[in-house]
Image (cartoon, grey):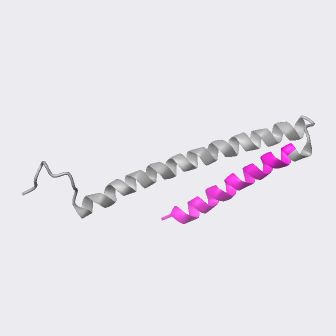
Amino acid sequence: MTDPYRFSSTPADQGRRGDVTRKGRRAAFRGVLWTLLILGAAGNAVTSLGGFNALISLAFGLATVLCIVLLIVDHFRHRG
Protein backbone atom coordinates (compact mmCIF):
# COMPACT_ATOMS: atom_id res chain seq x y z
CA MET A 1 0.00 0.00 0.00
CA THR A 2 1.38 3.41 -0.93
CA ASP A 3 1.28 6.45 1.31
CA PRO A 4 -0.27 9.42 -0.56
CA TYR A 5 1.26 11.89 1.92
CA ARG A 6 4.84 10.75 1.39
CA PHE A 7 7.09 13.30 -0.33
CA SER A 8 9.98 11.08 -1.36
CA SER A 9 9.56 9.00 -4.47
CA THR A 10 10.66 5.46 -5.14
CA PRO A 11 14.09 4.84 -6.71
CA ALA A 12 12.37 3.74 -9.92
CA ASP A 13 10.68 7.13 -10.30
CA GLN A 14 13.82 9.17 -9.69
CA GLY A 15 15.43 8.18 -13.00
CA ARG A 16 12.38 9.19 -14.99
CA ARG A 17 12.37 12.79 -13.80
CA GLY A 18 16.08 13.13 -14.44
CA ASP A 19 15.71 11.83 -17.99
CA VAL A 20 12.99 14.35 -18.75
CA THR A 21 15.08 17.17 -17.34
CA ARG A 22 18.14 16.07 -19.30
CA LYS A 23 16.18 15.79 -22.53
CA GLY A 24 14.74 19.25 -21.98
CA ARG A 25 18.15 20.71 -21.33
CA ARG A 26 19.60 18.96 -24.34
CA ALA A 27 16.80 20.23 -26.56
CA ALA A 28 17.33 23.77 -25.29
CA PHE A 29 21.09 23.47 -25.79
CA ARG A 30 20.63 22.22 -29.34
CA GLY A 31 18.11 24.98 -30.06
CA VAL A 32 20.56 27.63 -28.92
CA LEU A 33 23.33 26.06 -31.01
CA TRP A 34 21.15 25.98 -34.11
CA THR A 35 20.13 29.60 -33.58
CA LEU A 36 23.75 30.69 -33.14
CA LEU A 37 24.75 28.67 -36.20
CA ILE A 38 22.18 30.42 -38.38
CA LEU A 39 23.07 33.84 -37.00
CA GLY A 40 26.79 33.16 -37.43
CA ALA A 41 26.36 31.99 -41.02
CA ALA A 42 24.19 35.00 -41.86
CA GLY A 43 26.65 37.37 -40.18
CA ASN A 44 29.53 35.76 -42.04
CA ALA A 45 27.73 36.14 -45.38
CA VAL A 46 26.81 39.77 -44.73
CA THR A 47 30.29 40.78 -43.58
CA SER A 48 31.97 38.88 -46.42
CA LEU A 49 29.83 40.40 -49.13
CA GLY A 50 29.44 43.83 -47.52
CA GLY A 51 33.08 44.82 -47.55
CA PHE A 52 33.56 44.76 -43.78
CA ASN A 53 36.86 44.07 -42.09
CA ALA A 54 38.08 40.51 -42.67
CA LEU A 55 38.52 39.92 -38.94
CA ILE A 56 34.81 40.46 -38.34
CA SER A 57 33.97 37.93 -41.04
CA LEU A 58 36.53 35.54 -39.58
CA ALA A 59 34.95 35.82 -36.12
CA PHE A 60 31.51 34.97 -37.51
CA GLY A 61 32.98 32.07 -39.48
CA LEU A 62 34.76 30.66 -36.43
CA ALA A 63 31.59 30.94 -34.35
CA THR A 64 29.69 29.07 -37.08
CA VAL A 65 32.29 26.30 -37.25
CA LEU A 66 32.29 26.01 -33.45
CA CYS A 67 28.50 25.56 -33.42
CA ILE A 68 28.77 22.89 -36.13
CA VAL A 69 31.43 21.01 -34.15
CA LEU A 70 29.39 21.20 -30.93
CA LEU A 71 26.27 19.91 -32.70
CA ILE A 72 28.24 16.99 -34.17
CA VAL A 73 29.77 16.14 -30.80
CA ASP A 74 26.34 16.31 -29.15
CA HIS A 75 24.88 14.05 -31.85
CA PHE A 76 27.53 11.36 -31.47
CA ARG A 77 27.48 11.56 -27.68
CA HIS A 78 23.71 10.98 -27.46
CA ARG A 79 22.96 8.77 -30.45
CA GLY A 80 21.32 5.57 -29.69
- Vertical order, 40 against 73 (above or below): above
Please name the residue shown 45% across and 48% down the image.
24
Observer-nearest of 56 and 31: 56
Residue range (magenta)? 56-80
Place of residue 66 in the rendered image (x, y in percent of width and height, measured from the top left): 71, 55
- In what quadrant of the picture does the N terminus appear? bottom left
Instruction: Specify whether 12 is left or right of 29.
Output: left
Does 74 appear in magenta?
yes
Dominant secondary structure, magenta: helix
Residue that sits furthest to the top in the current view: 50
Residue 52 placement: quadrant: top right
Please name the residue shown 61% across and 62% down the image.
73
Total labels: the figure holds 0
Place of residue 55 in the rendered image (x, y in percent of width and height, measured from the top left): 88, 47
Please name the residue shown 88% across and 41% down the image.
48
Instruction: Specify whether 50 is left or right of 14.
Output: right
Residue 47 placement: quadrant: top right
Observer-nearest of 56 and 77: 56
Place of residue 28 in the rendered image (x, y in percent of width and height, measured from the top left): 52, 46
- Vertical order, 42 against 66 (above or below): above
Instruction: Specify whether 37 is left or right of 54.
Output: left
- Vertical order, 47 against 55 (above or below): above
Does 3 appear in magenta?
no
Observer-nearest of 18 and 7: 7
Please name the residue shown 33% across and 54% down the image.
17
- Vertical order, 46 against 14 (above or below): above
